[in-house]
Amino acid sequence: MFGAAMLSQLRDLDLQLLRLFVSVVENGGFSAAQGELGIGQSTISTQMAKLETRLGFRLCERGKAGFRLTPKGEQVLAATRKLFAAIEVFKGEAQGMADKLLGELHIGLSEALADEVLQRVAAAIERFRRRNQDVQIELLSAMPGELERRLLQGQLQLAIGYFSGNQTALDYHLLFNERQQLYCGQGHPLFIGGAVDPHELAGCDGVLHPYRFISADEPWQAGLSSARSEQVEGSLAFILSGAHIGYLPEHIAAPWEARGQLRALLPPQLGFDVAFHLARHRARQPSEAQLALEEDLLAAFAG
């Protein structure tokens, strides 16, 4: 519809000329449009001639018979109004996008988190969803070493867990501490009886946690270990068997303790805290969505 030269490259000047054209039509001619456009009739005539040259055909007839659009002028008017309407839609959508969080977020969570921790994560997500956003969020549960690996490879933007702290490429922000205790199960020689003598632990078969970055911090170190588990559930099964003792998070052991199937061994002396952090890759530029979710997570765990 528009001339070939104009179609190949629509410039700001062309838009200005088209706006002038619509104003002339809506005011019923060159003379009547002077007041709205703030320019003289001769200038309007010159600009209209320039537009017609760009298009390659006449848009209107002007003279003693008055102002009248040509058939092509009618079509250009309809197309121009569609163009300006589309521009307004674009401006509105672009303005909306300027304030809107977009994209995808892949977040890692350590295994077997306490209910309170999950509630805080949920509160952060709820707060994030109240923002102006259209973000796809994926939550992935894995062991700490796997979470760090995925952070380093860019498969995760954020992860919550207990980490080695040795990855210089990662930033860590402390969120909370989790209490660990040493336990034995029903059927173990230490389960029934009075106070436990620390020397009685020396010959106990302990559960080895090869994946844990916290093993060196455990106050009790097993001299003997025929049980190995990379997951909390496996450690719990070994301890419940009555053949092994080992460390568990208090929130994992609590229901089993309440049923009389686990006993904490020397809690004051052998319990310890594990620090959980929010981790991210230091060198990767975070998206606006990532920064917003980080802010919401930190706020949820600060309360």
Image (cartoon, helix red, strand yellow):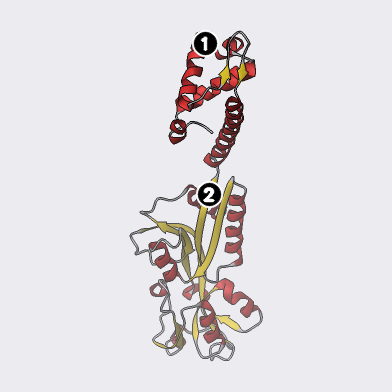
Q: Nearer the viewer, residue 76 or 136?
A: 76
| Residue at screen point 35% across, 63% down | 167
Who comes first in sequence, dot 1 or dot 2?
A: 1
- Does dot 2 land on a helix, a strand or a loop? strand
Q: Dot 2 corresponds to which residue?
A: 102
Q: In which quadrant is the N terminus drawn? A: top right
Residue at 47% from the left image edge and 72% from the top image edge: 143
Tag 1–tag 2 contact (CB < 8 Å): no
Whether residue 26 is visible: yes
Instruction: Say which amino acid is labelled 1.
Output: Ile
Viewer-proximal residue, 128 or 191?
128
Q: Where is residue 159 in the image (x, y as percent from the top left)?
A: 47, 61
What residue is at 52 percent from the left and 39 percent from the top?
98
Q: x and y percent of residue 196 in the render?
A: 51, 84
Circle 2 crowding by C-alpha within 10 Å: few under 14, some 14–19, many from 20: some
Circle 1 is placed at which residue position? 39
Q: Quadrant of residue 27?
A: top right
The correct choice, above or below, for 82 with respect to 154 in the image is above
Query: In the rendered structure, which amino acid carries the disc numbered 2?
Result: Leu
Looking at the image, residue 161 sits to the left or right of residue 166; the answer is right
Residue 211 vs residue 36: left or right? Answer: left
- Label number found at residue 168: none
How far apart, in angstroms, are the residues tagged by discs 1 and 2? 44 Å
- The answer to whether residue 10 is above or below residue 283 is above
Residue 158: x, y in percent? 47, 59
